[in-house]
Image (spheres, coloured by chain):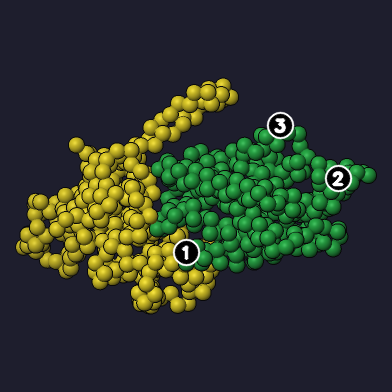
Amino acid sequence: MRLFWELSKLSFARQLNYRAATLAGLVTNLFFGLLRAAVLEALYGSREEVVGISLQAAITYTGVTQALIAFTMIFGWYEVMDSVYSGEVASDLLKPMNYFTFWLARDVGRAVATFLLRGLTIMAAYALIFPIIVPQGAEQWLALVVALILALLVSFAWRFLVNLAAFWTPNALGIGRFAFILSWFLSGFLMPLRFFPDWFQAICSLTPFPQVVNTVVEVYLGLLTGADLLRALGVQLLWAIGLILASQLVLRAGVRRLVILGG
Amino acid sequence: MSSIITVSGLHKHFSVPKRRAGLWGTLKALARPEMTVVRAVDGISFTIQPGELVGYLGPNGAGKSTTLKMLTGLLVPSEGEVWVNGQVPWRERERYVASIGAVFGQRTTLWWDLPVVESLELLQHIYDIPAARFRDNLAQFRALLDMDSFLDTPVRSLSLGQRMRADLCAALLHDPVLLFLDEPTIGLDVVAKERIRQFIQHVNSEHGTTVLLTTHDLSDVEKLCNRVMIIDQGRLLFGGGLPHLMERFGGNRELVVDFAEEYPAVDVEGAAVVARDGLRVTYQFARQEITASALIGRLSARYRIQDLAVREPEIEATIRRIYEEKLLESP
């Protein structure tokens, strides 16, 4: 536990040092957020709401999803892959620590730092420009925090699993790109999943990806209450547990397959 | 005494896809890849006793690093058995690596962007080293490796010699019973090499740490190792002490004589003249046939001698001869 904390702390501190990258990311995220808000506003036209989502909620949706990009690394993450191909993985495997937990600790530090630096800043900028929706009451805030933590776990386990492809093939970059486009598209990042036809929603719900984005935003917007809310968080939790277990199994097989290059 | 490392019938084979020429070849390879099997390690057996300092030698690509990776649990063998310190390295990796230290000379185990001391403190948590022991060990290694000047420098800014010292320190903070070193002196200058050697010697003699090291620098072997193993093409060719190796494959010794006056003929039984330069004559003789003192006796009985020196064959040349002439064909 102490080690987890130390690793997270280091990763957090490292993230704070990337000032230029943070600023660039922030500007990009905000720019595309405004673009998406403008598109939605045009599509809504004179309609008050679509499938129970008001224009104000839809615009808030673009803000929250933009704020989640860096936190959950929706667009992809290749750090484990890079460390396998650089051979750095050998140093990590020579240390008496669980390889999954080691990366999780680092990702948590990174996620918390980007949440504070980028996530909160984007939401604050949105609040200045639009009349956005803000969660009400302790209960909804608590649910939001839980949903965010579970979203990070699901997203990390998925990213870790995709990266493990590097243990089998000497070039897993293509697999990674495909997997991350898939998860991005099916997560509800583009538009609230409620906007899509039932059959598409049904496909999405067979994958873990809505747990990373769609669920978080629905909790944020207060679209889920009471039993629905608890059920949604429960589903998130199940996906997190399932993916973490799967990544442990795949990791165990991968370590036995691994060919460390060089030296 | 029971062995700390027991290796028997160890094999590691890699399947490498065969490349074929041309577009058609590439397409064919895509559909039905043809694999070539590379036998990186091809049936090796040996044992190492606690407290030994063993050198593992061989030309590039001989299988040294592959063996070391299997011994440290990074690779799973294709065949064969390995017991290190009562454990099978790859079976319970996390438990096993807590008891060993390893330095792979070409890459660091430290964190690239952290100051050395922070990397070491992180290792304290990773290995769960009690604070007092960590402090003592760090103080000791700092002094021995003269690390004070760069403890606060990020690893990426260290010189190669500094990095190697930091890595050695990192590998030993948790008091491992075994230390694996893959080319620990590669690329270092003479002074830095000497410092590293003294440190390895110290760890071996003072802490009783068993050391297995690979190297291309035969001075490492000469100064450190009480036993060497030579591997080539995945097979073990020799295992034993250096003197024994030299005795068997050392080739001929040389006697350089400066005569007091010029003689028309300087032949002597038991030795051959290989060079003659004015008053200086170089003889070559085999240790099995005649001792140096007998030869000198014969010469001084016949000629007036100003000065003389016996030259032992160089280790480096001997090992090169073993590799090149394949003197050690395995059975």
Q: Secondary structure at mark 2?
A: strand
Q: Is residue B167 left or right of residue A104?
A: left
Q: Which residue has dot 3 on it?
A: A199
Q: Residues within 10 Å of mark 1 (few under 14, many from 20)?
A: few
Q: Which residue has dot 2 on it?
A: A49
Chain green in the figure, letter = A
Q: Which residue is nearer to you in this view: A86 or A103?
A: A103
Q: Chain of mark 2?
A: A
Q: Residue at x 39, y 49 (%)?
A: B74
Q: Which residue has dot 1 on it?
A: A1
- In space, the residues marked 3 and 1 are separated at their CA atoms by 43 Å
- In space, the residues marked 3 and 2 are separated at their CA atoms by 22 Å
Q: Chain of mark 3?
A: A
The amino acid type of the residue labelled 3 equals: Trp
Name chain B's colour: yellow
**Residue A65, horizontal then vertical, whole percent:** 73, 51
**Residue mark closest to the camera, 3 vs 2:** 2
The amino acid type of the residue labelled 2 equals: Glu
| Tag 3 and tag 1 share a subunit | yes
**Residue A3, horizontal then vertical, whole percent:** 47, 64
Decide which of tag 2 and tag 1 comes sooner along the chain: 1
Which residue is situated farthest in the right direction here? A46
Q: Residue at x 39, y 75 (%)?
A: B131
Q: Is residue B310 left or right of residue A152?
A: left
B99 above or below A262? below
